[in-house]
Amino acid sequence: MQATLRKSRDDGLVLHIPDTLAKRARMSDGEIVNVRLNGVELVVSKRPRYKLKDLLARHSPAKNHGEVSWGQDVGREVVPA
């Protein structure tokens, strides 16, 4: 299947992907994708979508730490009591 490169307004290129291919890849308008070069091939892939519960499931209490002292507040950091 072919896609088309077109000049964009900001001197970049826009990759026009046919709807059938976008649907098969489960990609939609405005979606942010990863782009990388593999030799001379341009590889476009979906960005992973993370859920907070999945990220927190990998967390263990052993990774917790106490407060960190950064010293006295200065300038506009000072918060009135």
Image (spheres, rainbow, N blue to C red):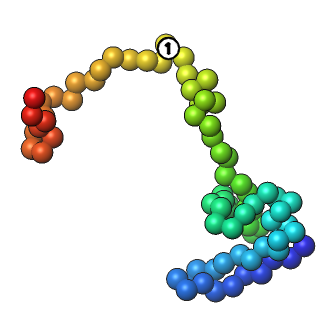
* Left or right of 27 in this view: 21: right
Q: Which of 74 and 23 is in front in this view?
A: 23
Residue at the spot of label 1: 61
- Image: 74 above or below 21: above
Quarter-wise, where is residue 59 in the image?
Answer: top right
Q: Which of 10 and 29 is in front in this view?
A: 29
- Image: 16 above or below 32: below
Residue 14, position as x, y percentages in the image: 66, 78
Quarter-wise, where is residue 76 in the image?
Answer: top left
Q: Residue furthest top?
A: 62
Per the image, label 1 sits on a secondary structure element best described as helix
Q: Which quadrant of the figure contains the N terminus?
A: bottom right
Residue 20, position as x, y percentages in the image: 87, 69
Q: How crowded is mark 1: few (under 14 residues within 10 Å), some or many (20 or more)?
A: few
- Image: 70 above or below 24: above
Residue 6, position as x, y percentages in the image: 69, 85
Quarter-wise, where is residue 53 in the image?
Answer: top right
Residue at 49 percent across and 13 percent down: it is 62
Residue type beneath disc 1: Pro
